[in-house]
């Protein structure tokens, strides 16, 4: 597929102090840390930023799961970094109430759950008021399978509904600090000569050209592709670095009895399962399946969809949910440290930095593991590994919720005034773009076309898409509508919405009919490959299963 051409400068022959491979949340965090330290940094991503594992996660900033697995250090790291995100990105990361629901067949006893939650609250400083959960707990009890005696516990965790937006913000900050960023640019190989990494051989798909750059350090943060990058570069390894685990999810509409609070429970086989209100829908996941296939072609298989559906129906039998109700399913590969036993989700998730000097290649570091919450911690460790001073974030008191709400109301009013926008459109913009919303509002003021909603069901406007092309390295329509302004993940979205959005964006971007058609076709192809509609042969799940 031919990508839209860009006017970005050629890279051939340039020298960078740090070249980062991989534009997921880890790679972008590392590039930002290096650029902020004054290092000339290049960030390259073969597809689009945040289009891989980052956008295919459960979208949580959780510390309880690693604690239950006995990974105390990783739990502390996750909780510490989570608190920083909650303070710094209040529009993207927010506290979320969770209910832990265990049935009598659970491998975990009520006592062990209480003990784990007591330790979790001690580590997290959780000051949630249990009385405030009482209504949600009773609602959940009514919806659960009444034939079993459930133990229900409450705790407070955190959610990042749109990590794609977090990546976009960090990307803008990395570029502002001097980083050069290139999406849709494949690393053909790391240039290795005389026992050290010396640069990268690249293919820029927007210009269909090959380029070679020099680099003092190369950081391989390509997630599930880390082993493949080394194989293509003839870096000989004693064993793989990554055990790939496929995590699949299903997305459904709000159903009768659906929880309005996130639920952490167990699937039909006793594995962890989350049922989470997300983006006006219900997100259910994830599976844990060892997967060594091409991460770029990953998709949920019918057995996984059936497993998730059966697990949901076993928990909420009154909902009468069927396969026909599933809006879509998606899957991603999590890159966990290599486990020769192939146990997948039993592997520790604390990150590892592999120095390839032990493989006779100096100045090449591969990053394995970590999660959404710990990306900034991984970035600091990686920076230190290559001799860059990286300070720990300063602790600060958590913000007062009522004060934040008041400030948000004031900010929304300022945006509405600056952009001649409705309160609804201004609030939607503030919630996704935070401090950048004011720049987009000024852009919106330029014309009625800029203030037009992207589709008739959305409050998000064309100016947000234009800002993504102008400031956030978006190249394709999918880059915009699936990640920078992710309206195409919403409950309303259809082919009609895609067509309306393409036409409205085209009107201000100056695309001709042929260009608009190409953008639209590419969006629909990417969306269909990412968000899979289950085939009709996925059977109806019943509580008896």
Image (spheres, rainbow, N blue to C red):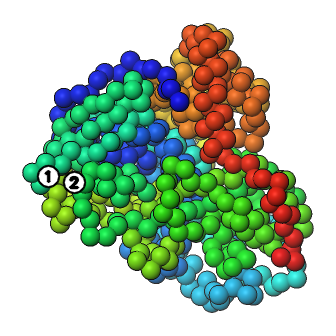
Farthest residue toward the left?
Answer: 194
Query: On the picture, is 50 further left or further right than 329?
Result: left
Residue 70 screen position, x and y as percent: 46, 81
Q: Secondary structure at mark 1?
A: strand
Q: Of tags 1 and 2, which is closer to the observer?
A: 1
Disc 1 marks which residue? 196
Examine the rendered structure and indicate whether residue 273 appears above or below residue 503: below
Q: Residue at x 27, y 38 (%)?
A: 201
Q: Residue at x 40, y 77 (%)?
A: 340
Instruction: Specify whether residue 213 is in view.
Output: yes
Q: Residue at x 25, y 41 (%)?
A: 200
Examine the rendered structure and indicate whether residue 225 appears above or below residue 285: above
Examine the rendered structure and indicate whether residue 84 appears above or below residue 350: above
Examine the rendered structure and indicate whether residue 515 appears above or below residue 297: above
* Residue in the foreground of this view, choosing between 351 and 518: 518
Badge 1, how many Cα within 10 Å: few under 14, some, many 20+?
A: some
**Snapshot quadrant of residue 484:** top right
**Snapshot quadrant of residue 332:** bottom right
Query: On the picture, is 418 further left or further right than 18?
Result: right
Query: Where's the C terminus, which quadrant?
Result: bottom right
* Residue in the foreground of this view, choosing between 16 and 262: 16
Asked if the residue under mark 2 is in contact with the one under mark 1, i.e. CB atoms within 8 Å, the reply is yes
Residue 524 screen position, x and y as percent: 66, 33
Q: Could you say which disc has been placed on residue 364 in the image?
A: 2
Q: Residue at x 39, y 71 (%)?
A: 338
* Residue in the foreground of this view, choosing between 26 and 421: 26
């Amino acid at each position: 597929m031919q990508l839209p051409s860009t006017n970005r400068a050629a890279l051939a022959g340039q020298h960078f102090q740090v070249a980062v491979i991989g534009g997921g949340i880890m790679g972008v965090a590392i590039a930002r840390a290096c650029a902020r330290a004054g290092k000339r940094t290049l960030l390259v991503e073969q597809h689009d930023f945040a289009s891989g594992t980052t956008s295919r996660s459960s979208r949580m900033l959780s510390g309880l799961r690693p604690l239950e697995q006995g990974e105390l250090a990783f739990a502390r790291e996750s909780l510490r970094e989570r608190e920083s995100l909650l303070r710094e990105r209040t529009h993207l990361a927010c506290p979320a109430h969770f209910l832990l629901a265990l049935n009598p067949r659970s491998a975990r006893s009520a006592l062990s759950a209480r003990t784990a939650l007591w330790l979790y609250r001690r580590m997290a400083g959780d000051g949630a008021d249990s009385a405030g959960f009482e209504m949600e707990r009773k609602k959940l009890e009514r919806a659960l399978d009444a034939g079993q005696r459930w133990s229900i516990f409450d705790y407070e965790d955190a959610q990042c509904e749109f990590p794609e937006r977090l990546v976009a913000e960090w990307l803008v900050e990395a570029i502002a600090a001097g980083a050069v960023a290139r999406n849709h640019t494949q690393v053909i190989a790391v240039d290795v000569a005389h026992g050290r990494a010396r640069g990268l051989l690249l293919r820029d798909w927007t210009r269909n050209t090959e380029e070679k750059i020099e680099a003092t350090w190369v950081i391989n943060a390509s997630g599930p592709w880390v082993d493949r990058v080394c194989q293509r570069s003839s870096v000989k390894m004693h064993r793989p670095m990554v055990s790939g685990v496929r995590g699949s999810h299903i997305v459904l509409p709000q159903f009768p009895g659906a929880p309005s609070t996130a639920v952490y429970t167990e699937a039909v086989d006793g594995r962890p399962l989350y049922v989470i209100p997300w983006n006006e829908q219900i997100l259910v996941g994830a599976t844990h399946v060892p997967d060594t296939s091409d991460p770029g072609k990953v998709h949920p298989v019918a057995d996984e969809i059936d497993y998730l559906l059966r697990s949901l129906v076993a928990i909420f039998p009154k909902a009468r949910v069927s396969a026909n109700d599933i809006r879509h399913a998606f899957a991603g590969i999590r890159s966990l440290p290599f486990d020769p036993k192939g146990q997948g989700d039993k592997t520790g998730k604390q990150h590892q930095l592999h120095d390839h000097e032990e493989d006779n290649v100096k100045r090449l570091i591969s990053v394995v593991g970590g999660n959404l919450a710990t990306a900034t911690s991984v970035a600091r460790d990686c920076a230190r590994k290559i001799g860059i001073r990286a300070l720990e974030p300063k602790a600060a008191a958590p913000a007062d919720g009522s004060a934040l709400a008041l400030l948000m109301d004031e900010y929304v009013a300022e945006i509405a005034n600056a952009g001649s926008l409705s309160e609804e459109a201004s609030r939607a913009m503030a919630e996704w773009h935070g401090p950048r919303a004011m720049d987009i509002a000024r852009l919106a003021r330029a014309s009625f076309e800029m203030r037009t909603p992207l589709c008739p069901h959305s409050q998000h406007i064309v100016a947000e898409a234009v800002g993504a092309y102008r400031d956030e390295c978006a190249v394709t329509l999918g880059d915009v509508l699936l990640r920078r302004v992710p309206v195409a993940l919403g409950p309303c979205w259809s082919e009609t919405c895609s067509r309306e959005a393409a036409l409205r964006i085209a009107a201000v971007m100056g695309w001709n009919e042929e260009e608009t058609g190409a953008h639209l076709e590419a969006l629909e192809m990417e969306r269909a490959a990412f968000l899979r509609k289950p085939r009709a042969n996925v059977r109806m799940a019943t509580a008896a299963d």
